[in-house]
Image (cartoon, rainbow, N blue to C red):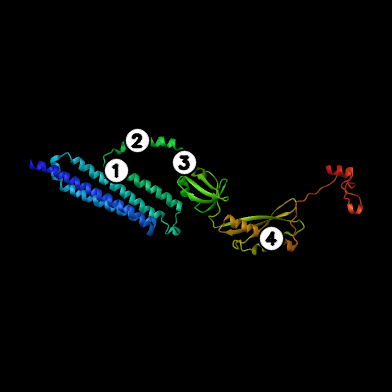
């Protein structure tokens, strides 16, 4: 009988100790969380998050060990009551559940530190977009494993859960078809790597610099300073031109020369004018090639390369090429003709007659006869 009356007292003592241990762990965890914000001032954000997550995991582990040991010491007295056995088992499961999610949080923080850290990004083979998507996928996988581990710990039948999740996945798939398509297209872009952040690209009708790549969309800043958001599915279905990936870009400028000019001489003059410019690359060497016969001129195409291509460097190089070639042609007497048309009069109307107003002494109005007007109309 004495032991029967002592058991509730012992149980209430353990309950008090349990509450005290949990309260102390929560208080220490709150202090660590607050100090983690202070650590970001002295350490990098990724390092501060890893330290904070590690300390939280350590505090939770110590609290769990203390409670389990304390409950095992009172196992004999609690077996007399019998009713609290389920409560202790549920408490252990709850602690293990908390530990699983704290461990999952800690692992994701460590992965974020190694995948998204900026310390050695220049020496990595993968792009920032690939590392970011890899981190998101790893984060989802880790938390899914933690959730399924929790269900298994609490005795939930995973087969029924997976069947329900399959039905729910089908419903959500029809409801969010476009969103899932963009997410799938994001993974395809991650694997194909057609561009990276900062590249000068043309996607369909949009041209600009890539500013952000997410799992759902691609953001670029066009040449007018506007920010354009394109869904990944739309990006994946359009033609993508990347002008930055090679580190150099070839430009073309056409110029016409008179038919009386020697093409070889004009080509050598234009090529010499190109080689004097610092705004274009010497290797690959610039080229000057005749490409076609136009109505009033022989068309030469000036081909030259620029490094580290940007719109500003492209416009600047085109400007100096046009100015320098035009000045060189002027020095050499090479004519860049205006568009010309050749008119022929019919023989039966007497053809055309050119009248010099100064020599004839007649005013301009009298110099055009009705016959000549008819000739022009014909």
* Alpha carbons under labels 2 and 4: distance apart: 73 Å
* Alpha carbons under labels 3 and 1: distance apart: 31 Å
Question: Badge 3 is on which residue?
Answer: 181
Callout 3–callout 1 Cβ contact below 8 Å: no
* Alpha carbons under labels 1 and 2: distance apart: 17 Å
Residue 321, image x, y percentages: 65, 59
Dot 3 or dot 1, earlier in sequence: 1
User: In this orientation, which residue lies closer to the viewer: 5 or 328?
Assistant: 5
The secondary structure type at the circle numbered 2 is helix
The residue at the far left in this view is: 1
Dot 4 or dot 1, earlier in sequence: 1
User: In this orientation, which residue lies closer to the viewer: 29 or 332?
Assistant: 29
Question: Badge 1 is on which residue?
Answer: 150
Describe residue 23's horizontal placement relative to residue 347 as left or right. left
Question: Badge 4 is on which residue?
Answer: 325
Q: Quadrant of residue 121?
A: bottom left
Residue at 17% across, 44% down: 12
């Amino acid at each position: 009988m004495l032991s029967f009356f002592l058991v509730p007292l012992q149980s209430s003592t353990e309950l008090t100790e349990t509450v005290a241990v949990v309260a102390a762990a929560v208080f220490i965890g709150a202090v660590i969380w607050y100090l983690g914000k202070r650590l970001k001032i002295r350490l990098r954000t990724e390092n501060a998050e890893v330290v904070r997550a590690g300390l939280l995991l350590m505090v939770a582990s110590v609290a769990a060990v203390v409670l389990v040991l304390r409950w095992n010491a009172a196992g004999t007295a609690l077996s007399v009551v019998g009713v609290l056995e389920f409560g202790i088992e549920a408490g252990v499961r709850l602690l293990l559940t908390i530990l699983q999610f704290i461990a999952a949080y800690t692992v994701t923080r460590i992965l974020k530190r190694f995948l998204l850290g900026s310390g050695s990004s220049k020496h990595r083979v993968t792009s920032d977009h690939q590392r970011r998507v890899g981190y998101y996928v790893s984060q989802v996988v880790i938390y899914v494993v933690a959730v399924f581990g929790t269900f298994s710990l609490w005795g939930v039948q995973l087969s029924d859960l997976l069947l329900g999740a399959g039905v729910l996945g089908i419903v959500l798939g029809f409801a969010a078809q476009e969103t899932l398509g963009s997410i799938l297209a994001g993974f395809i872009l991650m694997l194909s790597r057609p561009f990276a952040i900062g590249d000068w690209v043309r996607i369909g009708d949009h041209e600009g610099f890539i500013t952000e790549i997410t799992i759902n969309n691609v953001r670029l800043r066009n040449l007018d300073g506007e920010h354009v958001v394109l869904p990944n599915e739309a990006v994946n279905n359009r033609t993508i031109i990347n002008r930055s990936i090679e580190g150099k870009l070839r430009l073309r400028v056409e110029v016409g020369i008179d038919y009386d000019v020697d093409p070889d001489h004009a080509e050598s003059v234009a090529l010499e004018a190109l080689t004097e410019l610092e705004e274009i690359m010497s290797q690959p060497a610039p080229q000057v090639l005749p490409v076609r016969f136009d109505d009033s001129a022989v068309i030469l195409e000036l081909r030259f390369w620029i490094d580290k291509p940007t719109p500003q460097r492209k416009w600047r190089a085109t400007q100096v090429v046009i100015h320098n070639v035009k000045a060189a042609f002027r020095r050499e007497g090479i004519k860049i003709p205006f568009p010309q048309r050749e008119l022929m009069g019919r023989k039966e109307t007497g053809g055309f007659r050119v009248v010099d107003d100064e020599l004839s002494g007649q005013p301009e109005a009298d110099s055009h006869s009705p016959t000549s007007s008819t000739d022009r109309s014909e």
